[in-house]
Image: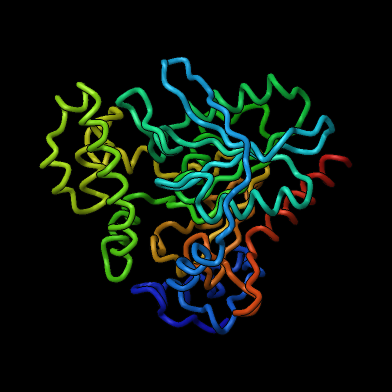
C-alpha cells in the first residue's frame, strides 16, 4: 500500500510502517479519503462546518450519588422492543452540539434507532456543583448512568460509543469494570497513549486545536473560581491564565484535582492502550494514521488486542473526520460504519 502524504508532521513515516507486512494483522479500514479531503486537517475541521443543523434531543438531569449531576440528551422516546440503545460519550469539552454527536444522533433518528448521550460534568452548558470535573479515566459517572439505563430498560441491549477522550474513558470502563448491561462498543479516534498525544498536540498546526480547547477549559475553570470557595483556595485567576498547553493543564488542574501525583502519573494510569487486551465484549476501534492529535504511539500491536476487539486503521481520516463523497455532496463514513457494525452485532445476537 502506498504511503500517504505527510499531511500532519511526523505521520507520513508512521503510516508507511503501519501498513508494512509486519503489521498485516491490523485490519485496514475500508475508508478512503476523497481527492478533495486527503489532508488530515481538512478531515478534522471540515465536518464541524458541514453540519449546520442543530441537534434535536430531549434533555434530562441525572443526579449522582455524590450530590453532583450529569445531563443526558435523548434522541426521543425509547422504543419498547429489543432494538439496542446506544449510549454516547463525547470528547474533550464536547457536548450534544459537537458535530460528530449531533450528526450521529440525526443519523440514528432517521434509521429509527434509540440513543442517549451522557455529558461529562460541566459540559452541558451549566457548571457542575462540585469541584471535581472529568478526565480520560473517570468511569464512575458512566457506570452510574449505564446501571440506571439497565434498570429502566431491562433486557434492552446497550451499546456504548466513545469519541476521542470519551473513547479512552470507554476503554477504561470496558477493561476495568465492564457493566453487565453492555453488549458491544465502538471507540473512535481515542488518545490511547495520553502522554504522546499531549506532546503531539503541542506541535505544528495541531497547536491550533490545543488553543481552541484550552480557551474553553480555562474559561470553565475561571467560572468555578468565581463561584466556588474550594476553587478559589486552590487556584488563582492569574495562574489559570498562564496555562499554555494541555500538559500544563493536566499538571496543574486535572492531576491534583483527581488524586494523581502529576500529569505523567495521570497519563500512565489512564491511557487505554495497555487495556485493550482486557476488553470482554465485541468492540470496534476506529483510528486514522494521520490523526493530528496523535502519533504512532497510540496504535497497538496485534498482541495488545483482545480477541473481541476489531481494530480498523485507515491511512487518512484526521481526528473524528472520515469525510468522503463529493465536495457538493459530502458523506460521513463514521455513521455508515457504525450502522453496519450495529447490524452485525444484532445479527450475531439473534443467532
Residue at x-position 52% and y-position 72%: 316
Quadrant showing the N terminus:
bottom right
For residue 297, which quarter of the picture? bottom left
For residue 114, which quarter of the picture? top right
Image x and y of residue 304, in percent = 52, 50
Q: In this view, does 161 lie above or below 335?
A: above
Residue at x-position 55% and y-position 39%: 278
Image x and y of residue 233, in percent = 14, 24
Quadrant showing the C terminus:
top right
**Does 92 sit left or right of 1 as displayed?**
left
**Does 26 sit left or right of 206 as displayed?**
right
Image x and y of residue 235, in percent = 15, 33
**Does 244 sit left or right of 37 as displayed?**
left
- 20 or 140: which is nearer to us? 140
Q: Which residue lies furthest to the right in this view?
A: 351
Residue at x-position 51% and y-position 65%: 288
Amino acid at each position: 500500500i502506498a504511503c500517504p502524504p505527510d499531511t500532519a508532521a511526523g505521520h507520513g513515516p508512521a503510516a508507511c510502517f503501519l501498513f508494512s507486512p509486519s503489521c498485516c494483522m491490523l485490519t485496514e479500514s475500508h475508508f478512503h479519503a476523497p481527492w478533495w479531503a486527503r489532508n488530515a486537517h481538512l478531515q478534522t475541521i471540515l465536518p464541524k462546518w458541514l453540519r449546520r443543523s442543530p441537534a434535536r434531543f430531549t434533555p434530562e438531569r441525572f443526579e449522582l450519588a455524590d450530590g453532583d449531576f450529569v445531563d443526558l440528551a435523548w434522541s426521543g422516546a425509547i422504543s419498547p422492543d429489543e432494538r439496542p440503545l446506544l449510549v454516547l460519550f463525547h470528547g474533550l469539552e464536547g457536548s450534544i452540539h459537537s458535530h460528530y454527536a449531533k450528526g450521529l444522533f440525526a443519523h440514528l433518528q432517521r434509521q429509527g434507532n434509540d440513543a442517549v448521550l451522557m455529558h461529562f460534568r460541566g459540559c452541558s452548558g451549566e457548571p457542575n456543583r462540585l469541584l471535581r470535573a472529568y478526565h480520560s479515566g473517570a468511569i464512575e459517572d458512566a457506570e452510574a448512568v449505564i446501571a440506571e439505563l439497565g434498570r429502566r430498560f431491562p433486557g434492552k441491549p446497550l451499546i456504548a460509543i466513545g469519541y476521542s477522550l470519551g473513547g479512552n474513558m470507554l476503554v477504561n470502563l470496558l477493561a476495568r469494570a465492564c457493566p453487565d448491561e453492555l453488549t458491544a462498543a465502538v471507540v473512535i479516534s481515542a488518545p490511547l497513549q495520553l502522554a504522546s498525544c499531549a506532546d503531539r498536540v503541542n506541535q505544528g498546526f495541531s497547536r491550533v486545536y490545543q488553543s481552541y480547547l484550552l480557551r474553553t477549559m480555562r474559561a470553565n475553570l475561571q467560572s468555578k473560581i468565581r463561584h466556588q470557595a474550594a476553587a478559589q483556595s486552590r487556584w488563582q485567576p492569574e495562574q489559570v491564565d498562564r496555562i499554555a498547553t494541555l500538559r500544563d493543564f493536566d499538571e496543574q488542574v486535572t492531576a491534583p484535582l483527581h488524586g494523581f501525583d502529576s500529569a505523567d502519573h495521570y497519563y500512565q494510569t489512564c491511557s487505554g492502550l495497555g487495556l485493550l487486551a482486557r476488553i470482554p465484549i465485541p468492540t470496534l476501534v476506529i483510528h486514522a494514521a494521520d490523526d493530528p492529535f496523535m502519533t504512532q504511539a497510540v496504535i497497538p500491536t496485534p498482541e495488545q488486542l483482545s480477541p473481541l476487539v476489531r481494530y480498523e486503521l485507515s491511512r487518512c481520516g484526521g481526528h473524528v473526520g472520515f469525510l468522503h463523497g463529493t465536495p457538493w455532496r459530502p458523506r460521513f463514513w463514521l455513521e455508515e460504519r457504525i450502522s453496519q457494525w450495529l447490524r452485525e452485532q444484532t445479527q450475531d445476537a439473534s443467532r
